[in-house]
């Protein structure tokens, strides 16, 4: 994890980036509490972004994907707070600037296949965010102190066969930035809204592939960082807005359907142990057990009856001069990023997913009737009920309201 602390004399902000899949909400709360105790930076002024690498120790709990190591998580929270504390203790007068550079190391993964419908594949015509956003903080003599860059693409170059801990392509991108800019620069990668974007091309899913994509992204970041015209921090006012909205959840399944889901999940596990395969693949078994756990939870909700249920969703906005940074806690579809950026009253707006926790996938309203993994399946690993399409408008309107409040306020 790496931390950037900004202070204009009135407002203090902390941005943390980490090479994690995500963080459970209780870990986010614990970490923010430690940050406040050590630095005085309030929870709402601390933005915790995860790169979403699929090759990291578990700091997020997903059904069927094992349990997190509590000793590791305890150290993780304290180490992140320590990083913020170290940054806060080394505040110095600096200059700030931002830029955007065209680059793309991902592809829209929602592909329609005949007789199968919406699948996880490649959709070259699908929406992407083909750029990298770059923030540069430098000393008064021009030496780079920190370069924070953001791009939208799942770090899944290395597939399920990889059992080593790695930052995937963002790690190589950060290495390029540090190598070229030199000195003591801190290179920070923040994941944008990559919910429907995978790293591409993956080719063989090797470390060489990850390095190739990381080098492409890192090179674009270095170019942008070199072109940035910085301003002294006296000309860069800071601000913060934070709101937790309630997203409506879909109703539970009818009781009969919920019982059928439990029966089907139980049968699936029995089938995995059926001859001639008495030793099923551990991954398949864990996912089947996770699906059974979801089905039983769904049955419990169905027995409670249909009543309005909602899910909290924190939207956090930082202002850094004429730049805004938006943090959203989910695997957010890239369309949200493009919409908020287009309509925000700022020169440049970074929109980050996987920030301050993760509620699961956040599809657009248009994606719901299309179905697919992000709409019909993945929520079972994150929770019990999926959100409704109305969540789309709630998120967009609240995000823009907060962005405009940063200017009007």
Image (spheres, helix red, strand yellow):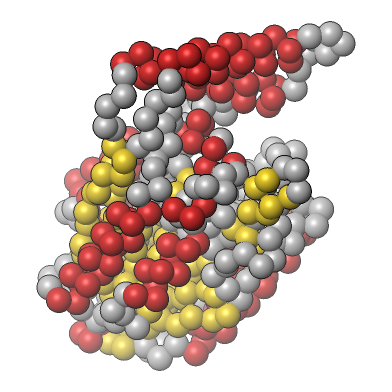
Within the image, what quadrant is residue 31 found in? top left
Q: Position of residue 213 (x, y in %)?
A: 69, 66
Q: Residue at x 43, y 62 (%)?
A: 336
Tally of marks: 0
Q: Position of residue 300 (x, y in %)?
A: 38, 15
Say which of 296 and 189 sits in front.
296
Q: Position of residue 48 (x, y in %)?
A: 36, 53
Is residue 177 something one can see in this rendering? no
Q: Quadrant of the C terminus?
A: bottom left
Q: Is residue 13 left or right of residue 265?
A: left
Q: Residue at x 48, y 28 (%)?
A: 69
Say which of 166 and 263 sits in front.
263
Q: Residue at x 39, y 40 (%)?
A: 387
Within the image, what quadrant is residue 392 found in? bottom left
Up-down relation of residue 273 to residue 88 (above or below): above
Say which of 168 and 143 sits in front.
168
Q: Residue at x 35, y 37 (%)?
A: 249
Up-down relation of residue 284 to residue 217 (above or below): above
Is residue 334 something one can see in this rendering? yes
Q: Position of residue 365 (x, y in %)?
A: 44, 53
């Amino acid at each position: 994890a790496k931390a950037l602390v900004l202070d204009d004399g009135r407002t203090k902000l902390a941005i943390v980036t980490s090479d994690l899949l995500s963080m459970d909400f209780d870990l986010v709360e614990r970490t923010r509490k430690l940050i406040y105790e050590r630095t005085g930076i309030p929870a709402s002024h601390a933005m915790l972004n995860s790169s979403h690498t699929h090759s990291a120790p578990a700091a997020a709990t997903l059904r069927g994907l094992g349990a997190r190591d509590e000793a590791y998580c305890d150290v993780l929270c304290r180490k992140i707070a320590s990083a913020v504390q170290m940054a806060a203790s080394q505040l110095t007068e600096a200059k700030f600037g931002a830029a955007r550079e065209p680059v793309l190391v991902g592809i829209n993964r929602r592909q329609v296949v005949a007789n199968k419908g919406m699948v996880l594949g490649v959709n070259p015509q699908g929406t992407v965010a083909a750029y990298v956003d770059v923030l540069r903080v430098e000393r008064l003599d021009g030496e780079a102190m920190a370069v924070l860059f953001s791009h939208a693409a799942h770090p899944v170059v290395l597939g399920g066969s990889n059992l080593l801990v790695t930052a995937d392509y963002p790690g190589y991108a950060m290495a390029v930035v540090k190598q070229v800019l030199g000195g003591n620069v801190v290179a920070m990668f923040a994941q944008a809204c990559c919910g429907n974007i995978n790293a591409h091309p993956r080719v063989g899913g090797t470390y060489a592939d990850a390095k190739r994509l990381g080098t492409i992204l890192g090179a674009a970041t270095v170019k942008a960082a070199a072109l940035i015209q910085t301003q002294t921090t006296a000309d860069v006012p800071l601000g913060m807005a934070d709101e937790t909205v309630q997203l409506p959840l879909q109703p539970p399944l009818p009781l009969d359907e919920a019982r059928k889901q439990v029966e089907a999940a139980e049968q699936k596990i029995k089938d995995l142990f059926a001859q001639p395969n008495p030793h099923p693949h551990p991954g398949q078994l864990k996912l089947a057990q996770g699906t059974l756990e979801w089905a039983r939870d769904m049955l419990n909700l169905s027995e409670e009856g249909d009543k309005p249920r909602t899910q909290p969703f924190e939207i956090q906005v930082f202002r850094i001069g004429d730049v805004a940074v938006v943090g959203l806690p989910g695997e957010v579809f890239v369309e949200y990023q493009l919409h908020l950026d287009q309509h925000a009253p700022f020169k440049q707006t970074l929109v980050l997913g996987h920030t301050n926790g993760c509620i699961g996938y956040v599809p657009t309203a248009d994606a719901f009737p299309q179905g697919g993994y992000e709409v019909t399946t993945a929520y079972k690993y994150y929770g019990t009920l999926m959100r409704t399409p109305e969540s789309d408008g709630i998120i967009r309107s609240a995000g823009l309201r907060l962005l405009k409040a940063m200017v009007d306020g």
